[in-house]
Image (tube, helix red, strand yellow):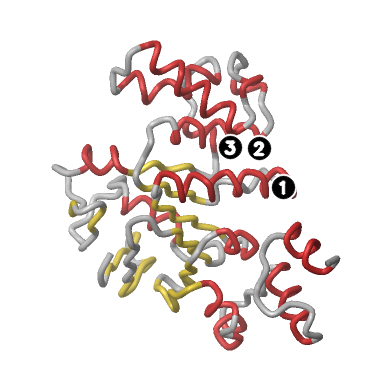
Amino acid sequence: MKDVHFAYGKQLVLKDFTLSLKRGSWTTLVGHNGCGKSTLVRLITGLIPTDQYIVVDGNQVTKESLNMIRLSVGVVLENPDDQFIGETVRDNIAFGLENLRYPQEEMEEIITRISHMLGITKLLDLNPTKLSGGEKQLVALASVLVLQPKILILDEAFTMIDGYEKEKLFKILVKLHKKMDLTILNITHDIEETIYGEDIAVMCDGKILAHDKKENIYQDEKLLKKVHLELPFMALLSEKLGYYHLVDHMIYDMDEMVDLLWK
């Protein structure tokens, strides 16, 4: 995206917005609610028509290229109910595969594999209305992952999943990111989620203020103070322990931290 402007009527949402993501990268885009993050997703996926310069997987976003782009991009939204259309969880996960006319046997194998990986096998025959918010978000993620997208966009996708379950989920995504060379754009207001990616883009007032390796963003105290963001807990803990020479680098995994300190 280069020098993108967008407004709803007279309300300017994006101004001089420029963002470039490398294939196979994992970027966490952080910004407070109302800064234009969700509008960004709608522009990338063509849900909002525009003539601005937006290129996805080598294709400029136009009416003619939308089908090709949507085959490359999978999006998981904050409200999973927006992505449910079938009577059972299995139906919803299978919907995209059916549209692409996958053979039944291959479709079942993919659904079984992804469901097992995300720990939702026991939910497959339930109606989505019977699920908790966190379970719905896992099903929404499964319905995207079965399509094997090149690019995964998470738009506040795990707000209903807390603590240990969210950590397990992100560790699964870390493995998929490496194994599939999956490009991930995680859009969130939760600074804690930045530890799982490689890069951070900081968004404020409709533009990107900074885009760099996460370690460099964490060290930019002036920037974090300007946008009212604090360091993730593990980054802050690593920094404090570094003062006492107990660690000599940033550690983002609690198990790794415990193992190091107890040696």
Mark 3–mark 2 contact, CB under 8 Å? yes
Residue hosting label 2: 134
On the image, which quarter does residue 105 sit in?
top left
Element marked by disc 1: loop
User: In the rendered image, which residue does mark 1 sit on?
Assistant: 162
Q: Amino acid at mark 1?
A: Asp
Circle 3 — which element? helix
Query: Which residue is found at the position 75% from the left and 60% from the top?
Result: 254
**Structural crowding at the residue carrying mark 2, measured as other residues with C-alpha within 10 Å and reported as few (<14), some (14–19) or many (≥20):** some
Rendered location of residue 120, percent (x, y)? 62, 27
On screen, residue 39 versus residue 174, left or right, reads left
Quadrant containing the N terminus in the rendered view: bottom left
| 5 lies above or below 116 | below
Q: Nearer the viewer, residue 229 or 93?
A: 93
Q: Toward the viewer: 31 or 186?
A: 186
Report, in whole angstroms, how far the alpha carbon at label 3 lies from the one at label 1.
12 Å
Q: Residues within 10 Å of mark 1 (few under 14, many from 20)?
A: few
Disc with the residue nearer the chain's start (3 vs 1): 3
Residue for point 48% across, 22% down: 111
x and y percent of residue 29 in the render? 48, 63
When the figure is inspected, residue 166 is found, relative to residue 145, above or below; the finding is: below
Q: Residue furthest left?
A: 64
Question: Which amino acid type corresponds to the residue marked 3 in the rendered image?
Answer: Gln
Identify the residue at image location x=49%, y=27%: 84
Tag 3 residue: 137
The answer for how far apart the CA atoms under marks 1 and 2 are is 8 Å
Instruction: Compute the Cα span from label 3 to label 2.
Output: 5 Å
The reply to whether dot 1 and dot 2 touch (C-beta < 8 Å) is: yes
Residue 67, percent from left and from top: 22, 37
Residue closer to the observer: 225 or 118: 118
